[in-house]
Amino acid sequence: MHSCLFSTELGWSAALWSELGLCELKFGYPTPAAAVAALREFVDPTPPTNSAKKLVARLQTFARGEPVGDFLDISLDTSHLTDFGGAVTARCRLIPPGETLSYGALAEAAGYPGAARAVGSVMRKNRWPLVVPCHRVVAAGGKLGGFSAPSGPDMKRRLLRLEGADLVPG
């Protein structure tokens, strides 16, 4: 396991990797200590690998509001996910920047029609926000819905605005 701590325009971030890929990413914290405390597990920061350096640079670029495309090339450690969670996570990763899907539409696209509430649970537990763009998943009718990152719905709205998404007011 290795980890790193870094700053972005969205606040302090911490990331944790295993040999399987990115285990966890936390962002939007006011202090380095808060970002570290948000991780489920933290190991002393190590010199970042080339792939970690590239991800950090892309996240910093994204936080400045510059386009970075998707993060589909980032390997994730999904060993904790159920088949349902894996399907929802994989499909969520395909939502393009600047676009949104409702929880119900994501459930259907992942092969589980009618499972909108369960999709909400998977998104709430998302260990890789931004890489798995749970901020692009909204409530029915285009309403914003919840967001578990610091500053909650305000941060979700900020992320969607960075991407140029059309938002329902409020």
Image (cartoon, helix red, strand yellow):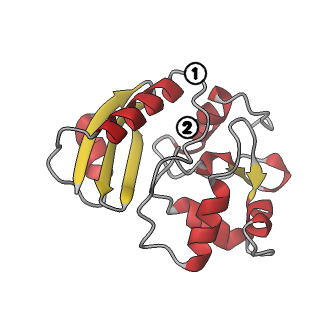
Residue at image mark 2: 155
Location of residue 19 by image quarter: bottom left
Identify whether 162 is placed above or below 152: above
Q: Which residue extends farthest left?
A: 44
Q: Amino acid at mark 1?
A: Glu
Question: Is residue 83 shown left or right of residue 24?
Answer: right
Instruction: Count all numbered tags in the image, as a single digit.
Output: 2
Q: In the rendered view of the protein, which quadrant contains the N terminus?
A: bottom left
User: How dense is the environment of label 2, judged by Cα within 10 Å: few (below 14), some, or many (20 and up)?
Assistant: some
Label 1 and label 2: CA atoms lie apart by 17 Å
Residue sitting at 70 percent across and 48 percent down?
95
Q: In the rendered view of the protein, which quadrant contains the C terminus?
A: top right
Q: Position of residue 148 (x, y in %)?
A: 51, 52
Identify whether 60 is placed above or below 123: above
SS class, disc 2: helix
Q: Position of residue 72 (x, y in %)?
A: 56, 48
Residue at image mark 1: 66
Tell which tag, 1 or 2, sits nearer the viewer: 1
Residue sitting at 67 percent across and 29 percent down?
161
Residue sitting at 29 percent across and 59 percent down?
18
Q: Amino acid at mark 2?
A: Met
SS class, disc 1: loop
Location of residue 80 by image quarter: bottom left
Identify whether 52 is placed above or below 140: above
